[in-house]
Amino acid sequence: VLPREEAIEQIKYSIKKTYGKRGESVVRRNYAAVDATLANMFEMKVPEKVTSTIELPPAVPGEAPAFVQDVTAMMIKGEGDLLPVSALPVDGTYPTATTQWEKRNIALEVPVWDPDVCIQCGKCVYVCPHAVIRSKLVDGELLADAPDGFLTADSRWREFPDRKYTLQVAVEDCTGCQLCVEVCPAKNKQAVGRKAINMEPQLPLREEGARNWDFFTKLPETP
């Protein structure tokens, strides 16, 4: 580690070498930036042990399988280097269907479905690169225990006129790419610029969206 004075001297030498051809005023302004930084640099004491009393949520839900609890969760917490070799499968394979437990919540905005505008074309389902938008045609009786806010619409499919159509979004898995909005052909005639799929802030929708998605995944895949 360079002594403080020598380090500052070298920084200013580098500034002079880099910006000297642009004039003395440019060099002086860069010197001033260095001096201002030094004048506002303060030491922050970091305790040897964690003193926070805030409880962090678990990395994965309690119902996740053992491999996800023991291995994937460690990686999510940034502690993958602590895993022993014995924790990994001996043949080098990795269990499938584990990403469903990795709820990254990285999207600031997520798609919200408007069943009154939707024409049930399925383009949003098809185009989603992470398969977080999915639709199903279900018997209305299966929706008796649906959570509040679980949206459905009467089926527009001639083959299944008595079914209910539902389209749900895994808000915790969405990346916010907006491809679903771009591809949606159904325009809201009552609100300019709105479609059957519209982006809304994720945080207020997270808990309700997670409940809806959990219920949706338990519905049968075929009518």
Image (cartoon, rainbow, N blue to C red):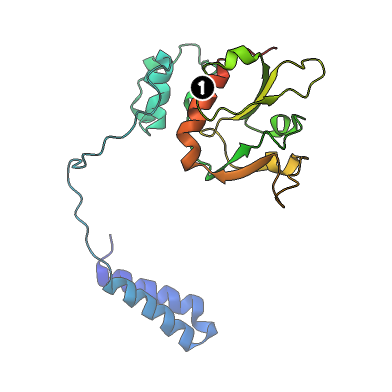
What amino acid does circle 1 point to?
Answer: Asp
Q: Is residue 176 above or below residue 82?
A: below
Q: Is residue 112 above or below residue 154?
A: below
Q: Tell me if residue 174 can be seen.
A: yes
Q: Please give the count of numbered marks on the rendered protein.
A: 1
Q: Is residue 104 above or below residue 201?
A: above
Q: Residue farthest to the bottom?
A: 24
Quadrant assignment for the C terminus:
top right
Q: Position of residue 220 (x, y in %)?
A: 62, 12
Q: Position of residue 128 (x, y in %)?
A: 67, 33
Q: Position of residue 19 (x, y in %)?
A: 50, 79
Which of the 4 quarters of the picture holds residue 219?
top right
Callout 1 environment at 10 Å: few (<14), some (14 to 19), or many (20+)?
Answer: few
User: Which residue carries the number 1 mark?
Assistant: 214
Tell which of 59 and 1 is nearer to you.
Answer: 59
Q: Residue at x 61, y 39 (%)?
A: 111
Dot 1 falls on a residue whose secondary structure is helix
Q: Is residue 29 above or below residue 47?
A: below
Q: Residue at x 60, y 29 (%)?
A: 151
- Horizontally, residue 221 falls left or right of residue 216, namely right
Q: Residue at x 41, y 29 (%)?
A: 75
Quadrant assignment for the N terminus:
bottom left
Tell which of 143 and 111 is nearer to you.
Answer: 143
Q: Tell me if residue 131 can be seen.
A: no
- Horizontally, residue 63 falls left or right of residue 183, namely left
Q: Position of residue 62 (x, y in %)?
A: 37, 19
Which of the 4 quarters of the picture holds residue 22?
bottom right
Q: Residue at x 36, y 72 (%)?
A: 10
Q: Residue farthest to the right?
A: 158
